[in-house]
Amino acid sequence: MRLLRFIPIKLTLFLVLGILLGSFHDFSIALSLGIILPSLGFLGFLAFKWKNRVSTLFGFIAFTTTLGLGILTVSLSNPKNLPYHYSNLGFDGKSIWKVKIAEVLKTTPFSERYIARIASLDHHTATGKLLLNLPIDPSGARLEVDDELIVRARATVIRPPMNPHQFDYRKHMARRGIDHQMTLGTQDYLVQADPSKTIYGRAASARNNIIAKLKTKGFGEKQFGIIQALLLGQRNDIPQETYNDYKNAGAVHILAVSGLHIGILLLLLEFLLKPVELLPKGKTLKLVVIVVLLWGFAFLAGLSPSVVRAVTMFTFVAYALHLNRPGNTFNILALSMFFILLAFDPKLLFQVGFQMSYAAVFAIVWIYPILQKFWWPGNKLVRKVWQLLSVSVAAQLGVLPISLFHFHQFPGLFFISNLLVVPFLGLILGLGILVIALASLNLLPHFLVFAYDTLIRWMNTIIGWVAQQESFIFKNISFDGTQLVLVYGIIICSVWVASKATFRRVAALLVTLIGFQLWLFHTSHRTDKKEVLWVAHQSKNSVLLNQKGRNLSIYTDIPLRTAKMAADYQVAQRISTVRYQPIQNSYFWKGKKLLVIDSLGVYPRSGASPDYLLLTQSPKINLDRLIDSLGPKAIIADGSNYRGTVERWQRSCAEKEIPFHHTGEKGAFYFESDGN
C-alpha cells in the first residue's frame, strides 16, 4: 500500500499501536521510560554518527521509539501513576473538595450535570476530574465554566451497567479520565465568589453572551437550537424530535461543530482571502489570518474538545494548502493526529467523535479521487452533483463500520440529505457567522433574522422529510468488533482493487470477504446453541429474560418499560423473535426450581425446597421463617423492592449463610452462565 510509504503515517500508526498496548496492559512510568530512553538514545546516536539514515535498523529504532512514546503517554495519563491524583490520596466517607467547573453537560430530567476539575481534597493539593450531579434549579440558573465550588460530599464510583449489553456509561466516562461522581443537594456545596478565569471559561462566557443576545431576536425554538449547534457547538437546546430527524436522515454530523464545518470554513476563508496573496509575503499573511480566524471560531464555539480537534486538524491542512502540495494531504492528516494524541490526550483515540472525524477525512482524501476517475460527466451541473455524491459516499464508507458498531443503524438515504443540505452549508455557516457578528454589535437587522430563520427552517423541513422515509432507515443491526475490523479490511481491499486490480489485491479482497462470511457462520452457530435465563435489574419492575437460540422470552408485568433493554439485548445477541409473557410463581430451569414471591407474599409453607428464591415488589414476609420453612439455596432481590427491605433481607441471609444477590448492587443475576 502506497500510503504506508509515508513516514508520518508509519509513525502515527506506531504511536496508535503504543497507545493501544499501554491502554490494555498496565505499564508503570518506570517501565515505559525503560522502553523509550534506550531507543531514543540509540536513535540519537544513529542520527548524528551514521550517515545511512534510511537503513532498516534506523527505521526499526525510530518506530520502536514511537511505540514506546505511545506507551509512555498512556502511563503518564494513568491516575495511579500520578502522586497527586485524588484516587491516591484516600477519600473515605464525606470529604471536603475544592473543584472548578470544566464542562457543562446536558441536563437530564432529574439533575444538572457538570464535569469538574479537582483543586484540593481535604485541604491537600489534588488533581483529577469528577462528574457532578446537582438538583435542577427551578429558576433555570446553572453553573458556568470556571465556577469554583467548595463541596462536602462522598465521591462514589460511577456504576457499570446493571444489565448486559446496555450502554456502559462508566466505561465512557473512564475514557475521559473520570471514574467517580457526586450527587449533591443544595446544602452540600458553596459557590465561591470571584473565581479565577481560564481561557475555557472566557470562551464559554463569550458564547453564552452571544446566545443571550440571539435569544432576544425572535428565532423559532427549533431553529434556534440548530443555530446554536451549527455555529456555537451547543447542542443542549435541540429538541429531541429534531435531533432524531437528523440522526435518522444520516445528517447528525451537521449538528456537531467538527471537521465538516471547519473544512467548509477553511475553504470559504481560502476563497475570500485570495486577494491577500497579491501583497508582499501575502501567502504567509493569508495563512496566519486563516489560522487566527479558525481558532477564533473555536473560541466562539467554547473550545470544546471536538472543536479543538477539528481546528487543530485543519490548521495542519491550511499549512498543506499554503505549501501548495496536495500530495502531502495524507502526511498532514497523519501529523495532525500524531500531534493531537500527544499534546491533548491519548484516550481521544477511543472516543467515537475522534474516530469518525479522521475516518471520514481520510476516506474522502483517499476514495474521492478514485470515484472521480470512474466517471467525469461533461455537463457541469451533473459533474457538481456527482462530486458532492462522491464526497458523501466516500465519507460514509469511512465511518460506516464505526457507525454500525456503536449505533447499530444505517440511514439508507444519507446521500439525499447530503446532496440537499451540504451544498448550502457554506452559505448557512457564512451567513450564520455574519448574524453572530452583527448580534454581538447590536446591529442585527430584523430582515436578516427572518431570512436566516427561514433558511434553517427549510433545512429542518428537508431533513424531517428524509427522516420520515422509515423504510430506508435500517435499525438494530447486529455488528461486533470483529465485523468492524473485517469490514474495514473489505473496504480497503476494494479501494485497492478499484484503483488497480492485481492478483494480490483481488486475493486479499477475497480473503477478507471469506473471513467475514466465516465469522457470520460462527456467530450464527453460537447464537443457535445459546440458552440462558437471567433476572434483569429495573427500578419498580420485575423482569426475567430467557434466551433459547434466536428466541427471547421476556417475563414481566409491564412490557413497555422493558423495550429499550430488550432492544439492546436483541441486537447484541442476534435475536429474531421476542415474546412477552406475565411473570409466573415458579419456573423450572435445567432441573432446578425457581420460586417467585411477589407483593402478596404467598408461598407454599413446606415441601417446596426451591433452589432459587426471587423476591419482588417488597412482599411482607418473615424471611428468617421462610428460609427455615423452604430452605432455598440462594435468594435474589430485584429492583422492584424497597431499599430498606432489601437491606433487612441481606442481613438475614448473612446470618443464615445463604447467598444473596441484589440486582441493584450486583447487576443482573444469571441462573446459568453460557459464555456471555
Image (cartoon, rainbow, N blue to C red):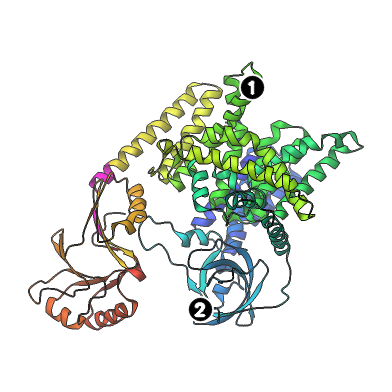
Q: Which residue is mark 1?
A: 381
Q: Say if 155 sits above or below 565 in the image.
A: below
> Is any part of residue 599 visible from this angle?
yes
Q: Say if 624 sits above or below 65 in the image.
A: below
What span is in magenta?
Answer: 525-534
Gap in Å between the C-alphas at discs 1 and 2? 63 Å
* Viewport quadrant of the C terminus: bottom left
Q: Amino acid at mark 2?
A: Arg
Counting from the top left corner in percent of width and height, residue 330 is at: 65, 36
Residue 154 is marked as 2
Q: Residue at x 56, y 77 (%)?
A: 89
Q: On the picture, is 626 further left or further right than 448?
A: left
Answer with the quarter of the image where residue 392 lies.
Answer: top right
Counting from the top left corner in percent of width and height, residue 509 is at: 45, 28
Q: Residue furthest left?
A: 607
Neighbour class for label 2 at 10 Å: few (<14), some, many (≥20)? some
The label nearer to you, 1 versus 2, is: 1
| Sequence-earlier tag: 1 or 2 | 2
As for residue 550 lying within the magenta part, the answer is no
- Secondary structure, mark 1, is helix
Q: On the picture, is 133 further left or further right than 429?
A: left
Q: On the picture, is 99 further left or further right than 351?
A: right
Residue 199 is marked as none
- Secondary structure, mark 2, is loop
Q: Nearer the viewer, residue 130 or 600?
A: 600
Q: Say if 395 sits above or below 577 in the image.
A: above
Counting every numbered tag in the picture gives 2
Q: Amino acid at mark 1?
A: Leu
* Viewport quadrant of the N terminus: top right
